[in-house]
Image (tube, rainbow, N blue to C red):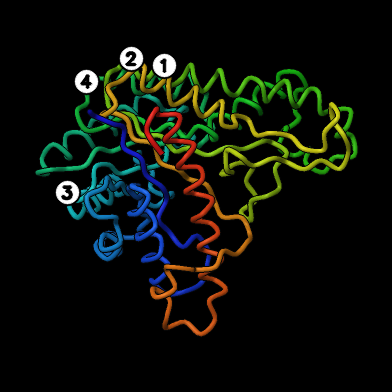
Amino acid sequence: MPAPKLLAMLIKQGIEGDDALLRLAQVRFQEAGLGAELYPASPEELQLLLAFRPADRPCTVHLPREINLLWPEARDRVMEFAVRAAGWVEGMTVHDHAQFGERPDAAIAALREADRRLAEVRNAPWLFVEYAAGLATDGFASLFERASDLERVSACIDVSHVGIQVCRTAYERALPGVDVCSLKTSPDLPERLGGIQRAVAEARPAVVGLVQRLARLGKPLHFHLHDGHPLSTLSCYGVSDHLSFLQEIRLPFAYQGRYLLGGMFGPAGLHEIVQTALGGLPPERVSFMLEVHPQEGRTPLGVHAALLSHWKDVTNAERMNYWLDMLLLNASLLREACGLRT
């Protein structure tokens, strides 16, 4: 029976150490039945990273974030990656940019050129354009509706990127000029929290609506899955998202009897998003990639210690292992949401 493609990010993500860390991720993903999304900085690095993809599992590639398809040299760069990836990976992800909303006709033309050039590469991967720059969701969706005839280009829905932008838009609608993500340490937070949570409540239905709209096109959709909340300070990168779907946000005061807030989605929201995608598309046209960033902690290497036997200090390996535990816990939630056996 066909099933959606399930993947997780395979990268060191700021944890220092040699490629044994990638090997550890590869082995644990393989054991869990997960594919991987790789993060090469160049086509040459992609060639090296392909050795760490889990065998016989789906593989996708996240291209460097600075690539902007509006520029000819960037499209050339995408093609360099595509030639290296052909036959090895199923999709490449590239970010959208603010100019896509300002110059939609130019963006459509760029997508069409990329599609034409990908068609000339045997076994070329799909090109998935990720929601990342905070465009209006209507504008983002309309780009792909206008380009619905393209055979190698589709959308990547980063659910928490969409959700955080929806929160920002909703809160600014109520309080013009105020960025909800700037209120993390505001002295007025107790008085503002009700309004913040009302904005947060708009994220889930907005993401579900976007999924429904793009699924109607019948083309493959790629998802980056992670939770978030405008008040989160948990990321070492200063963003409000890339959290586990089980993560809660600690408050310095009680709100509705608790000192913790859930994320925008939580497990129930993940389930609704996944089921909406699978209700709109055949499962083989859907790929779900867990993009949860690491939190600090350590897990002993246990049965995987031999992979790091050349290390004298395994602190960073145990930090990596802790992060992999978190990814695999979210993978179990994802499998449940897909209706698959865990």
Spatial CA distance of label 1 from label 2 is: 6 Å
Q: Examine the image and state in which quarter residue 20 appears.
A: bottom left
Q: Earlier in the sequence, mark 3 or mark 4?
A: 3
Give the crowd class for mark 2: few <14, some 14-19, many >=20 residues within 10 Å: few
Whether residue 105 is situated above or below residue 78 in the rendered picture: above
Cβ atoms at labels 1 and 2 below 8 Å apart: yes
Q: In this view, does 79 lie to the left or right of 260?
A: left
Spatial CA distance of label 1 from label 4 is: 18 Å
- Element type at mark 3: loop
Cβ atoms at labels 2 and 4 below 8 Å apart: no
In-front residue for pair 191/271: 271
Whether residue 85 is situated above or below residue 23 in the rendered picture: above
Give the crowd class for mark 3: few <14, some 14-19, many >=20 residues within 10 Å: some
- For badge 3, the amino acid type reads Ala
Per the image, the residue denoted by label 2 is 216
Numbered label attached to residue 212 = 1
Q: In this view, does 205 lie to the left or right of 223?
A: right
Spatial CA distance of label 3 from label 4 is: 22 Å
Give the crowd class for mark 1: few <14, some 14-19, many >=20 residues within 10 Å: some
Work out which quarter of the rendered image holds the C terminus and state it: top left
- Element type at mark 2: loop
Q: Position of residue 28 (x, y in %)?
A: 39, 57
Per the image, the residue denoted by label 4 is 149
Numbered label attached to residue 86 = 3
- For badge 2, the amino acid type reads Arg
Numbered label attached to residue 128 = none
Q: Residue at x 85, y 34 (%)?
A: 189
